[in-house]
Amino acid sequence: MSQKQDNDNAEPNGNDAASVTRTHRLIKLLQLLQCGRGFDADGLAEALEVSRRTLFRDLKLLEAAGVPFNYDKKTKQYDIHKDYFLPPVNLTVSEALAVMLMTRRLISRKIHPEYTQAVEAAQKLEAAIPARIRAHCGTVLDSIDVRYWPTSDVDCIGDVNNTLMKALIQKCKVSMKYDSFFHGRVIDDVIHPYKRVFMNRGWYLIGYSEKDKTTRTYKLERVEQLELRTELFEPDPGFSLESYFGHAWLMIRGDKRYRVRIRFLSKVAGNVEEVLWHKTQDTHREPDDSLIFEVDVDGLDEISWWVMGYGDQAIVLEPKELQDMILDRSRNLVAQYEEQQAADAVKTRAS
């Protein structure tokens, strides 16, 4: 009996072993079809050490699995479209570890609408790493974890995101129903979509509003309906996220630029100093180990909320407008707590 016939009929340890053998053979067949060399049926059968009958049975399995291989009648050769799989890559151990850190940690949470596709792509990337290296990297990853800030739910924006991506690719306008905090109600608008952006723990659309005649920011969760229109639009050649957001602290750009100086007391100084909060920031320590934090921002609302998060450990030195804003909010906060405590005391006496 020939070697090819032996391989065709081999079931060394029963059906499970035969399935493993077939799986390995199908993987090798995929690699041969993908390599770009071009094989006819005899060449594939010879490379796999199987008969033509087994080869054609394997090709039918690939076809049933949805693998789009091609057969050229002129050359009588088989191949797979070059865009179907990524070409094989040779990764170093460090590169493999970086890939597995991405696949097992960084996309292990739903932070973007294409989460499912990202997981599938990650599994394919990881499968290309040799088992020995994958096992080594897996041991290293056992000592690594990634904790994300809370983010918005991406499951509820799938349909909106799919429509938006088509509009961004085709450069076509969209009709939108939007629950607008700015207008205080649900509005109807026609938008020229410029960018989809993840920031401040959620996904946003940046686009030109035909209703307001200006470029605005829209949170995808608050889009109640989004439909493609037939009209195309010409993107603004002068638009960029850098110019749109300017020196906003996060994403809300005010009408005036301020030089902000804050003293952070020593208890939190190190925590503040370790982070690059803004592209314009400058910091230096004082003799008492406090931190002077300086930054140029467009608008004060967002940075005021950040400063108040540090409570009595942050003192605004300038501008006076920010001092007054935080002082007013602090007084209101004290008044609300005093009112609540008074109400609680009444309830306690009544009970």
Image (cartoon, grey):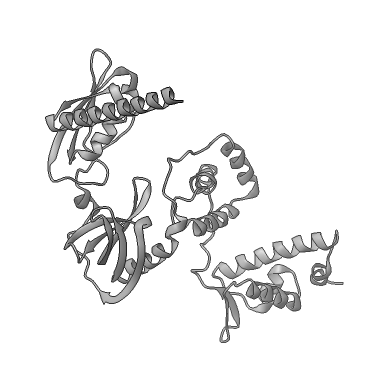
Please say whether residue 180 is visible from this viewpoint: yes
- x and y percentages locating residue 247 in the rendered image: 20, 43
Q: Is residue 33 above or below residue 179?
A: below
Placement of 15 over or under 321, stated as above or below: below
- Residue at 31 percent of width and 28 percent of height: 339
Q: Is residue 344 above or below residue 230?
A: above
Looking at this rendering, what residue extends furthest in the right direction?
1
Q: Could you tell me residue 342's position as x and y percent?
A: 34, 25
Q: Quadrant of the N terminus?
A: bottom right
Determine whether, in the image, residue 154 is placed left or right of residue 299.
right
What residue is rendered at 26% in x and 74% in y? 232
Whether residue 331 sits left or right of residue 29 in the image: it is: left
Residue 296, located in which quarter of the rendered image?
top left
**Where residue 303 sits in the image (x, y, percent)?**
24, 36
For residue 273, say whether it is visible: no
Location of residue 246 in the rendering, given as x and y in whole percent from the top left corner: 19, 47
